[in-house]
Image: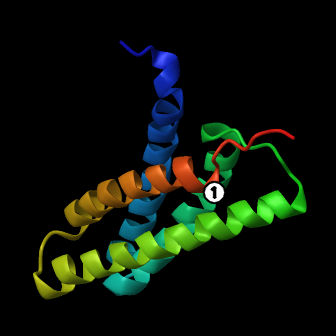
Amino acid sequence: MKGIREYKDFIIYCIFGAMATGVNMVSYHLLYNIAGMGNVISTFLAWLFAVTFAFFTNKFFVFVSFDRSLKTVMMELIGFFSCRISTGVLDIIFMYITVDLLSLRPVLFKFISNLIVGIINYLVGKLVIFKKRKKR
C-alpha cells in the first residue's frame, strides 16, 4: 500500500488546483454574470487569470521547481502555457457548446469543464513540464 508521501504532488496539486479553479470560476462569474461580457470572452479572460496564477503555484509549490535559470524558466513557461492553451481551447469549445448552443447552466458546466481540464493539466505538468530532471 502506498503512503501519503507518494501522493504528495497530487494532493498539493488538488489544493492549488482548487484555488486556480476558484480564480477561474469567480472571474468567469464576474465577467459573464456581473459585467455582462459574452460567454467566450469571459471564458478566455477567466482562463488567462487562472493560468497565470497556476503557473507560479505549480512551479514553486506543486512540482517544487526552484531552478530559476533563464533556460529552465523559459522551457517551463513555454511548456506550461502551450499545454494550457490546448486545454484552454478545449474549455472554450466545451463552454460554447454547452452554454451558447445547448443553453445549459453556465456555472455548472464551467465547473465540469474545470474538472476535465484540471486532470489533463496535472498529467502534463507532472509528466512533461515540471518533470524531475537528473542532476549532472
Q: In the image shown, does 65 or 45 lie closer to the viewer? A: 65
Residue 12 pos. (x, y %): 52, 34
Residue under label 1: 55
- Name the image quarter holding residue 31: bottom left
| Mark 1 element type | helix
Question: Can you say whether 101 is above or below 23 in the image?
Answer: below
In the image, what residue occupies the spot 76% across and 40% down? Answer: 134
Q: Quadrant of the C terminus?
A: top right
| Total numbered labels | 1
- The local crowd at label 1, few if under 14, some if 14 to 19, many if 20 or more residues have their Cα within 10 Å, is some
Which residue type does callout 1 highlight? Phe
Viewed as shown, does residue 11 lie left or right of 79? Answer: left
Residue 65 pos. (x, y %): 73, 43
In the image, what residue occupies the spot 45% across and 75% down? Answer: 86
In the image, what residue occupies the spot 42% across and 70% down? Answer: 87
Residue 122 pos. (x, y %): 46, 50
Asked whether residue 129 appears in the rendered view, the answer is yes
Q: In the image shown, does 33 or 71 lie closer to the viewer? A: 71
Q: In the image shown, does 31 or 69 lie closer to the viewer? A: 69
Question: Can you say whether 26 is above or below 89 in the image?
Answer: above
Viewed as shown, does residue 78 lie left or right of 28? Answer: right
Q: In the image shown, does 63 or 30 lie closer to the viewer? A: 63
Q: Quadrant of the N terminus?
A: top left
